[in-house]
Image (cartoon, grey):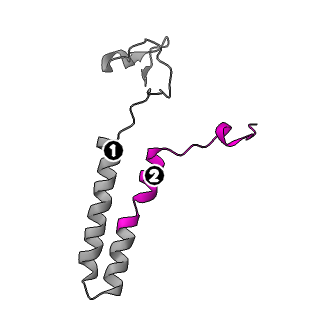
Amino acid sequence: MRKRTSHSDSIVSETRYDFILAVLPLPLFVGVTVGALTGQPLSLTTGAGGFVSALVLAYGLFVAAPTGSIRRSTPDTGLETPSESDRDGTTASGRRYRGI
């Protein structure tokens, strides 16, 4: 179990990506609010807010993309995956089986 001892020793640290995730819904909410409070069509203001949210998302995915080391969920064993013909075979009793 981890204990938090000081701010510099914090388990959670805010990053640029946390900021992007926090900002992502704001333009959409602003568009809905402007549409509800003014005479502008709600579909137009919501669409404009959604477009700005999509731009924020695109920025986070393509411009400010994470560049750190990539962690693999499974270790690299160096084994190649068997081909389709290698997976089909027979057992010692002569029964056919379908491998994964």
As drawn, 70 above or below 11? above
With 69 as the anchor, is 8 left or right in this view? Answer: right
Q: Position of residue 63 (x, y in %)?
A: 29, 42
Q: How many marks?
A: 2
Indicate the secondary structure of the residue bearing disc 2.
helix
Mark 1 crowd level (few <14, some 14–19, many ≥20, 10 Å Cα): few
Q: Nearer the viewer, residue 47 or 64?
A: 64
Q: Which of the 4 image quarters holds residue 36? A: bottom left
**How far, Cα to Cα, is label 1 from label 2?**
13 Å
Q: Earlier in the sequence, mark 1 or mark 2?
A: 2
Q: Is residue 11 magenta?
A: yes
For the magenta stretch, what is the residue range? 1-27
Looking at the rendered image, the disc whose residue lies closer to the viewer, 1 or 2, is 2
Q: Is residue 17 magenta?
A: yes
- Which mark, residue 61? 1
Q: Which of the 4 image quarters holds residue 30? A: bottom left
- Which mark, residue 25? none
Q: Quadrant of the C terminus?
A: top left
With 15 as the anchor, is 63 left or right in this view? Answer: left
Q: Nearer the viewer, residue 76 or 91?
A: 76
Mark 2 crowd level (few <14, some 14–19, many ≥20, 10 Å Cα): few
- Which mark, residue 19? 2
With 92 as the anchor, is 44 left or right in this view? Answer: left
With 41 as the anchor, is 33 left or right in this view? Answer: right
| Type of the residue with mark 1 | Leu
